[in-house]
Amino acid sequence: MHFAKNILILTTGALFVMPIAALADDASRNKEIVDRFAKCDKNHDGKLTRDEAKGCMPRIYDHFSYIDSSNKGYVTVAEIEAAASR
């Protein structure tokens, strides 16, 4: 039996066909983000400041202002994952 290697995704009224491999890549990327975030979040408050990102997550540090678009002074895992998906 031959199985399709695509998955249908319904979101905001639109139908997308996405390769399963892309979903696996996203899951792998998000796991890496979560793992690295946990190591860098020194005070374990669920927020990564620019100082915590410096040297620990250099790409986050370099793009901190873009990810922290509301200038809160910190970013969350969800914000980093959203930025990585763009």
Image (tube, grey):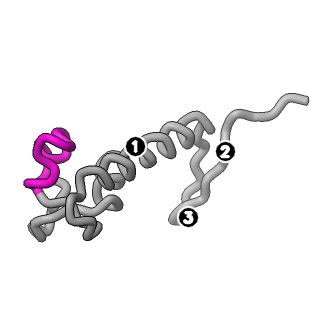
Residue 7 at x, y = what percent? 66, 44
Q: Is residue 12 magenta?
A: no
* Residue shown at the point (19%, 43%) measured from the top left: 56
Which residue type does callout 1 highlight?
Answer: Glu
Q: Residue at image x 16%, y 50%?
A: 53
Question: In front here: 54 or 7?
Answer: 54
Residue drawn at x 58%, y 41% is: 18
The answer to whether residue 51 is left or right of residue 57 is: left
Amino acid tagged 2 = Ile
The secondary structure that most of the magenta stretch takes on is helix
Tell me: residue 74, above or below residue 28: below
2 or 3: mark nearer the eye: 2
The disc, 2 or 3, on the residue closer to the chain's N-terminal end is 2
Disc 3 on helix, strand or loop? loop
Residue under numbered circle 1 = 32
Mark 3 Cα-neighbour bin, 10 Å: few <14, some 14–19, many ≥20 = few
- The magenta-colored residue range is 50-64
In the image, farthest residue toward the front: 43
| Pick the front one: 38 or 4 | 38
Q: Rounded to the nearest whole Å, what is the CA distance between mark 2 and mark 3?
A: 16 Å
Tag 2 and tag 3, C-beta contact below 8 Å: no
Residue under label 3, please give it: 13
Label 1: which secondary element? helix
Instruction: Give residue 34's position: percent from left, percent from top.
Output: 38, 52
Local packing at callout 1 (Cα closer than 10 Å; few below 14, some 14-19, many 20+) is few
**Residue found 48% across the figure and 41% down from its top:** 28
Q: Residue furthest right?
A: 1
Q: Residue tagged by mark 2?
A: 7
